[in-house]
């Protein structure tokens, strides 16, 4: 077995920008985000009722909204919508609450959506570390939840997610925030003890899975609750590990992705399938997932089940986000990359 990931000095040599140090702070960053968001005055927005809530953002800055939507799918009494791109949905009006999220504050697409929100009179809350979005918020008297500087947007997910969640709680959209948050943070702290840099491979689930994924193209699937987590892990494999990756969700994958198992052997033999599992998925889903696995088992290199932890929906979501972040970071190190670099993204931003 390759023991590279037992060598802390080797890991740190490639993790020059300190992605693993940021991951170590994840639970503390969650606490800090809650405290910060609680202090932000919302003005007249606090007394309004809304017909829908839109989360506008791109890339890593869109994920907090997607995870909120998955978490609250069964309990929120207004539609929750994710908007990625240059334009907001046409239904947005003065009865809509819009969160515009851009870590840098300079994301072209999100600034376009912010401009549209202001034009149609939507109640707008900004979540940013500053930049142009911060200036627009100040000029227009918009509530701004400040994000701390010094992070990659994808690494700021604790700050982004709990800025949104705390504000949604203040506005009455989330009833059980503190109960679910308490369990989720305890789960993450326990997982940190199992996955941190000084835990050897034979005791470290994240390092074990990173080794299994090396030299393969990973595709991630999750049930409805974990759809956003599957997208997050796919994106982290792209960004931290620098590998092509894909994602999908169940039960949708039963109607299309399963046919990929009938493809050419030279394509399939280099795939690794990761299945994000929720112990509360119904029997029908679980039976079909097992059949889905059977279709691919003889043809792909790896099929890996990752079990969500905890009993609450938030704990299940955040536990797999956190585990996936560690897996993708260790895989990046195995490939000899600094997980934090963004060379190709930076090139595209200059176009």
Image (cartoon, rainbow, N blue to C red):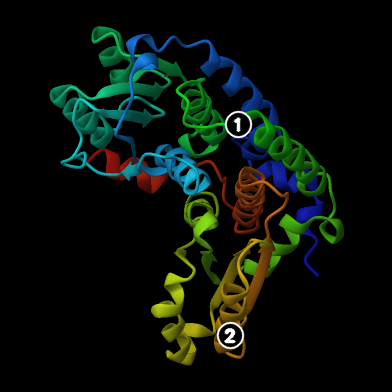
Q: Residue at x 41, y 28 (%)?
A: 103
Determine the residue positioned at 63% across, 27% down.
29
Does the image show residue 35? yes
Q: Which mark is residue 10?
A: none
Residue underneath mark 1: 177
- In the rendered image of this protein, does residue 269 appear above or below residue 102? below
> At numbered mark 2, what does the secondary structure look like: helix, strand or loop?
helix
Question: Image check: 344 left or right of 319?
Answer: left
State the residue position of label 2.
Answer: 291
Cα gap from disc 1 to disc 2, whole angstroms:
36 Å
In the image, residue 205 sits, relative to residue 191, either above or below, namely: below
Specify whether 132 is left or right of 219: left
Residue at (65, 61) in percent of width and height: 280
Which residue is located at x 37 percent, y 39 percent?
78
How many discs mark residues in the rendered view?
2
Comparing 152 with 59, the one in front is 59
Q: Quadrant of the C terminus?
A: top left
Comes first in the chain, label 1 or label 2: 1
Q: Position of residue 241 (x, y in %)?
A: 55, 55
**Which one is nearer the viewer's eye here, 89 or 265?**
89
Name the side, left or right, on which 17 lies relative to 343.
right
Q: Position of residue 295 (x, y in %)?
A: 55, 88
Q: Quadrant of residue 336?
A: bottom right
- Of residues 93 and 237, which is closer to you in this image? 93
Q: Is residue 199 left or right of residue 338?
A: right
Q: Quadrant of residue 126?
A: top left
Instruction: Look at the numbered disc 1 and give the secondary structure of its residue.
Output: helix
Callout 1 environment at 10 Å: few (<14), some (14 to 19), or many (20+)? some
Residue 70 in picture, x, y percent from top left: 48, 49
């Amino acid at each position: 077995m390759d023991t590279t990931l037992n060598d802390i000095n080797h890991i740190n040599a490639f993790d020059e920008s300190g992605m693993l140090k940021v991951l170590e702070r994840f639970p503390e960053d969650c606490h800090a985000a809650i405290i910060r968001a609680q202090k932000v005055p919302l003005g007249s927005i606090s007394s309004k009722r809304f017909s829908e809530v839109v989360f506008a953002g791109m890339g890593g800055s869109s994920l907090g909204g997607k995870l909120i939507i998955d978490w609250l799918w069964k309990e929120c009494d207004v539609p929750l919508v994710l908007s990625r791109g240059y334009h907001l949905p046409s239904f947005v009006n003065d009865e809509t609450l819009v969160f515009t999220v851009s870590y840098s504050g300079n994301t072209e697409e999100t600034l376009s959506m912010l401009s549209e929100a202001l034009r149609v009179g939507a109640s707008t809350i900004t979540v940013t570390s500053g930049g142009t979005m911060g200036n627009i918020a100040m000029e227009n008297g918009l509530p701004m939840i400040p994000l701390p500087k010094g992070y990659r947007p994808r690494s700021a997910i604790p700050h982004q997610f709990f800025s949104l969640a705390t504000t949604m709680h203040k506005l009455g959209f989330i009833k059980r925030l503190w109960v679910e948050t308490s369990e989720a943070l305890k789960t993450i702290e326990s997982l940190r003890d199992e996955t941190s840099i000084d835990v050897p491979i034979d005791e470290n689930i994240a390092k074990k899975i990173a080794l299994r994924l090396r030299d393969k193209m990973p595709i991630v699937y999750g049930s409805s609750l974990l759809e956003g987590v599957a997208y997050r892990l796919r994106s982290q494999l792209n960004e931290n590990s620098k590998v092509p990756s894909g994602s999908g969700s169940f039960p949708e994958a039963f109607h299309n992705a399963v046919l990929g198992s009938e493809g050419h052997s030279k394509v399939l033999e280099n795939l690794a399938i990761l299945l994000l599992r929720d112990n509360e998925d119904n029997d029908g889903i679980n039976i079909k997932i097992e059949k889905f696995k059977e279709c691919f088992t003889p043809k792909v290199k790896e099929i890996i089940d990752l079990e969500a932890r905890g009993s609450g929906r938030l704990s299940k979501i955040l536990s797999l986000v956190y585990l996936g972040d560690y897996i993708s970071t260790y895989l990046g190190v195995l490939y000899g990359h600094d997980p934090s670099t963004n060379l190709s993204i930076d090139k595209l931003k200059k176009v």
